Amino acid sequence: MRKNHKLNILAVSIAAGGSLLLAACGGGSNSTAGGGGQNLTATAISAKNAQSLFSSNSCLSGSVNFAGTSAWYVSGTLDIKNTCNSQQSLAGQTISFTSQDSKGKLIAVGTLNNWWINNTDYKLVFSAGNGNQQIANVSAANNNPIIAANQTITFNGGLNLFGNTFDNAEAQRSFAISGASPTPTPTPSPTPTPSPSPTPTPTPTPPPVTTGSLNVVVDTSAAGCTGTTTCNGLSVNVTNSAGTRIANFTVPTASLGGTYTQPIKDLNAGSYTVAGSTIASTTVTYTPGATPSITAGNTSNVTIKYTAPVVTTGKATISLASVVPNYTANLQVQILNTKASNAVVNTYTVKQGASFTTEDLPASDSTHAYVVKMTTGIADPIQGLYYIESGLPALTITKAQTTTLAIPLKASTIAKNNVTVAISGLSSGDTAGVIFTDAVNKYSYVNYTALANSSPVYKIESGLNLGVSVTASSNSYVTNPITSTGVISAAKTITTKFVPSVTPTPTPTPTPTPTPSADKVVTVYLLIDSPAQLKQYTDDLNRVTKVNFNRVIFSFVKPTLTNYVSGSLANTGIMNYFNAGDGQGVAAFNQLKAAVTLSKAKNIQAFLSVGGWNYSCNYAVYGDKCGAAATETNGIHYDWFPDPSDATQAATAKTSYENVIKLTNDLGMQGIDLDAEEFWHADKYAVSWKPGSTGEWSTDIAKAINTAGGPTYANLVQYGGGAATSSGPAIMPKTVDKMAAIMHALEDNPNAKDLMFSTAAPPVGARPITGFVYGDNAADIYTKGGVWWMGNLKGLWYNLADKDKAIVDRFDSIGLMTYDLCGDNATTCAPYGGGPLDLPGQVGAYMKDYTNWLKSTAPSAASLTVDQNGKVALLATKYNISSKIQFGFEVNQPAYPQNPSGQLQLTNTLVDTITAQQKGSGGVIIWQMYSKQNTAANGTTSKYTMKQSCKTFLANDSRYDCNADFPSLPQ
């Protein structure tokens, strides 16, 4: 009787830096016929990419090289290359590779340096990863690590060895750059040169290629499969780094005895294992092969081959101790052959406290030497437990024996930082789950479930490029899950406030139209000063089947709304009912409510705007800066927002904001637009910002702030703020307090729990104005911020986030009023010193302010340092708020400046240029639907602006028609 060996194949690890989900099945069917020996290629199967907080930036590549014959010391380099024609941020990018000597022993890398590049010094400080992995985040002395277009940054250093040469080939093979997902269109670097004028026919920048392809070749030509059924049913599995099967295909019978190629396309960067099934046979076993990498835009190839018999075999039983009790899922273990370039022999799953036994493996000899590798460590952040594999233990396979091996684990010694995940907004009965990941898959983490509204504190390893995903148990929220990524270098709080989805208001139609999705929002303001203007809108809606926008904002309601009576627009300020008006407030209310119902039937979200310029201006304070004085005959009215934080106004404020919410709900609207433009208030209550005069030499102020606990918003205001002032540099703490109180009054009201919020925000509102700098310079505005010289609301929304991020997160969208900008004076018009004066350049600059400071892909805590000479450096906090960021268009002739030669009139060409430039944003706000065309300056029209905006943001949504004949000409 002959002893059967098992037919095994090579399991191939594909290293590229993220996670992946492939399509389930491909290939042909099998039958009872014998192998046909044909060489076939299947139709490609597409990857279905799982949501991942990390992926590779297709612009970045790199290499490591520590070649040398010394067994005691070797010097070398590590390169990072930007292959794109635009600057890339290296913040949040993590470098990793396997660092070991020729015997498989860990070699610590330490620090690699580039002492001077991009006007500062860069470094990589490596720490221990899992097994023999070394991990580093890119840092720069100016805290703004970037890599210029087509630039290569080279880091130098040396490695101390201990009697064996360095395994440079394995370091090069395993090298990876991982980080937060890149934005589709890289943001240009700040430059003192104004942006070039737009060309008549702009060409949109294509999004970077972020996926690659893989050809899996199954070679059974030497396996004795032809003409027999021995190999029938041979299948190939693809598993992820956690050992979960995410794809499989079966080799068709006709191709057994030949080669079968299965292409897989649309692969994100990731680390996977390709493994074939085990089949009983008396003639064949496996032979290890190569381990290819996937790179964006390229196709990799891997062959899994069944070959000649191996007579001398043995087995191994491998066990894993239980060190992290709360982690109960599978872990992945690989056996590598170090004599074949660390090829993956096979991959197994095991739980803590358990073991597994391998299939027959060739005995250890001159071509087979094995090590055992866990693909990740194990972590329980709530308990602060972090364990990694202690090196890669050698596994000796002996003929006809079963070797036992316990995987050695050790506790990580890296310091921990307290990270609070503040969960709020969950409805009654709902819970949330928290899932952690990291950029290089260093750990498999305990998942935390059934969490109520709370603020659990997790102990996170310092230096981890961490991803956090918080998922509510129901899908009734605007954003779910809420995610965050960033390098953990200090204690921090991650705010996850769930905002309930808007429940569509029932309409008279038999089948209510659902609220349209608003991942991208084309918002159009509708100024309605009379019933006739509102009728034009409803007449236009009735003319078309579909529209070219998905949000309308009915404008404006006055903020001091103390006399509202349900069912009437009297005393609301909208449709000219500043008081009782013509006495037809009830009819006007019904007309507006019908317009709201019709809007929702056309898949348009309906919002009510409170404020606007006239209803944000205290004429008694600001005088003719508000505009012409109000008289009984000119129809002009002014109002302003009552302050809930001022005891003399608190009662009025409470009634007013309750009535705003009641009016919104009575009309069946889905949201409130907060359009507070109170320049007067900021100027009236401004106080001096003392570091604006002393800049980076504000030593005593910085020390006082740090002594008080660091650069929080409250400490910056307390120690950096001075006396009342009528000139800058200044700050506006009373205005920030007032706005925060108004937002709380609206958001915290139980009757607003189903409402969304939006705002028309100042374009300068995202830049910190508490900079330890003398002015707004291109080199500093994205790291240190700037200062405020009064006359606008600079820094308002940044300060609100710095004071209370949760109230900002409640807003669905922040629309920048990137209009009424000037272009004739570099001193007063440019977004920063030496900045652009053209409209696309200014829109881009202000949008970058918001994305850099409030929508950062690498949020970070503030840092305030004082060096030995007393020089101060404040790097302000960067946030990643939940709100969408929209840019703004104004169709009519700009209201500012009064000099037409300085006005930046929106034209068709500029609409094309700016929508192409900002296609990666959250959408656009348009002022306003029935604006008159400025023909004297070749101005655009509302219809053209809405059509092009729709094509940019809503083209793939079948509920809208971007070519709709909408709206009609203004009357």
Image (cartoon, rainbow, N blue to C red):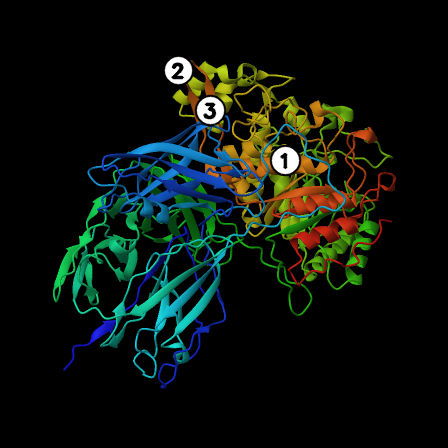
Q: Callout 2 environment at 10 Å: few (<14), some (14 to 19), or many (20+)?
A: few
Q: CA distance from mark 3 to mark 2?
A: 22 Å
Residue found at x 18% / y 69%: 311
Residue 901 lies, in percent from the top left, at 82, 30
Screen quadrant of the N terminus: bottom left
Seen in the picture, residue 806 relative to 345 is either above or below; the reply is above
Is residue 555 among the parts visible in the rendering? Answer: no
Q: CA distance from mark 1 to mark 3?
A: 27 Å
Viewer-side label of 1, 2: 2
SS label for mark 3? helix
Viewer-side label of 1, 3: 1
Q: Are marks 1 and 3 in contact (CB under 8 Å)?
A: no
Which is nearer the eye, 462 or 77? 77
Q: Would residue 901 appear left or right of 289 to someone viewing this image?
A: right
Q: Residue furthest bottom?
A: 32
Q: Would residue 599 appear left or right of 44 to someone viewing this image?
A: right
Q: List the residue tagged with mark 1.
A: 846
Q: List the residue tagged with mark 2.
A: 868
Q: Amino acid at mark 3?
A: Asn
Residue found at x 52% / y 50%: 499
Q: Would residue 807 appear left or right of 789 to someone viewing this image?
A: left
Residue 471 lies, in percent from the top left, at 44, 54
Q: Amino acid at mark 1?
A: Tyr
Is residue 777 among the parts visible in the rendering? Answer: yes
Which is nearer the eye, 227 or 59? 227
Nearer-N-terminus badge (1/3) = 3
Q: List the residue tagged with mark 3.
A: 715
Nearer-N-terminus badge (3/2) = 3
Q: Are marks 1 and 2 in contact (CB under 8 Å)?
A: no
Q: Quadrant of residue 800?
A: top right
Nearer-N-terminus badge (1/2) = 1
Q: Would residue 882 appear left or right of 123 to someone viewing this image?
A: right
